[in-house]
Image: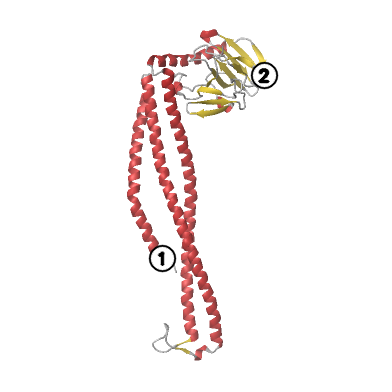
Amino acid sequence: MSFNLPKLIFASALLLLLSAPVLAGLNEDLAANQAEQDRLQRLIDGAKNQENTLGSQIARFNNQIRLTQLQIDSKQAELNSKEAELAGLNTDIGTLTGRIGNLETNLNDLVKIAAKRFRVSQAVENAAPLETSFIGGDFQTASSNLTYLEYIQRKDKQIFGEMSALKSGLSVQKSTLQDRQAQVKKLRDTIKSDRDDLASSRSQLDSQKAAKVSLLKLTQNNEANYKRLLDAAKREAAQIAAAYNNKGGSRWVHKGEIVGSEGNTGYSTGTHLHFGVHPSPYNYYNNVNPCGFISCDYRGDEGFVRSGRYRVPIQWDGVDYANVSQWYGMTYWARSGAYGGGPHTGVDMYTYNGDSVYAAEDGQAYFYRGGQSNGNGVFIYHADGMVTLYWHLN
């Protein structure tokens, strides 16, 4: 009827002994994983000082992809361990809930028995119990027989002792249950955070793999092509800065008004639009992510852009998005040092050769015409304090 605490302690100790080898093996695996992560990180850091070639860039990608995969494996192992711990806690909670129910049932039964015995003891006392002997039974003494009242009183004491033990056991079980429930809540929050982190790492891995594939495709796995494209990326920044300092006439334009057409003027890897957003006054190296103003749909290293706070600056009839060939941020060209160690300062997008380019928002537009060699572009100042850049126009 009552809870057997020694048995629970023994069972818990046995569980710990059985799980110890598993935990030791997990810790060894995680330690080996971390050692390999550290080795790869040293290779990645060391590669920053090496000659920038297509081969070194691909090696860097391979090491980074391997490092991210190891991080994912480590996070997954830790998540599996926590989920197993959560399952064990939920099992404990179920067991404890059952025990508490049994203890409460037993305690209620004893309370009912005690109430009945109280009524009996009152009746016996009223029937002159001091003159009535109780012969035999568990409470027979060596010198004399007990009276009925003495017998009842001793039995009552026994029952109340059992009730006290049940209450104490019930209190312990409820306290343990509360501890387990608190552990479950904390562990669930941790698991949710770990799952989100794991999903982010997997997305990062997909992006790294896609970036490697994109680089190989763009360069056709040819060192000369890589050098040519890297040089073009490096020159783009200087070219845009020079264009801003030599921009020509200006006029007011409305959101959605055509300001040019998609092209490949200046240092360009092909027909596309470089769209940047810069705080006013304009500075090429002072920039913000255009995805805070237009709607970006990331899909690995490529994706799509649509209208958001600003109108999407390029699209074609019946389709409300443009393809992306390079995002804002530390792209593989940025990591190659193409932009002076900084991020790619805009989003490169494309539709079809010659498609119209539209003003993303109302503003004062300044035009630059440098031709095929020096590039063509538009800088538009907006009322929200931002300047939008449209580059590589025809």
Q: Amino acid at mark 1?
A: Asn
On the rendered image, what quadrant is the C terminus found in? top right
Locate residue 161, reporting x and y percent: 46, 73
Is residue 14 left or right of 160 when viewed as pictured? left
Instruction: Indicate the quadrant where residue 224 lies.
Output: top left
Q: Is residue 160 above or below residue 189?
A: below
Which is more toward the observer, 278 or 57?
A: 57
Name the residue rendered at 38%, 35% in the picture: 70
Callout 1 crowding tier (Cα within 10 Å): few <14, some 14–19, many ≥20: few
Name the residue rendered at 48%, 63% in the picture: 100
Q: Residue furthest front?
A: 318
Q: Is residue 191 above or below residue 389?
A: below
Locate residue 128, reporting x and y percent: 54, 89
Q: CA distance from mark 1 to mark 2?
A: 81 Å
Locate residue 383, reporting x and y percent: 65, 22
Viewer can see residue 380: yes
Q: Which mark is residue 314?
A: none
Query: Could you say whether the residue bearing mark 1 is in a helix, strand or loop?
Result: loop
On the rendered image, what quadrant is the N terminus found in? bottom left
Give the number of marks. 2
The residue under label 2 is 254
Query: Could you say whether the residue bearing mark 2 is in a helix, strand or loop?
Result: loop
Q: Amino acid at mark 2?
A: His
Which is more toward the observer, 136 or 301?
A: 301
Q: Is residue 67 above or below residue 178?
A: above
Q: Which mark is residue 4?
A: 1
Is residue 130 left or right of 69 when viewed as pictured? right
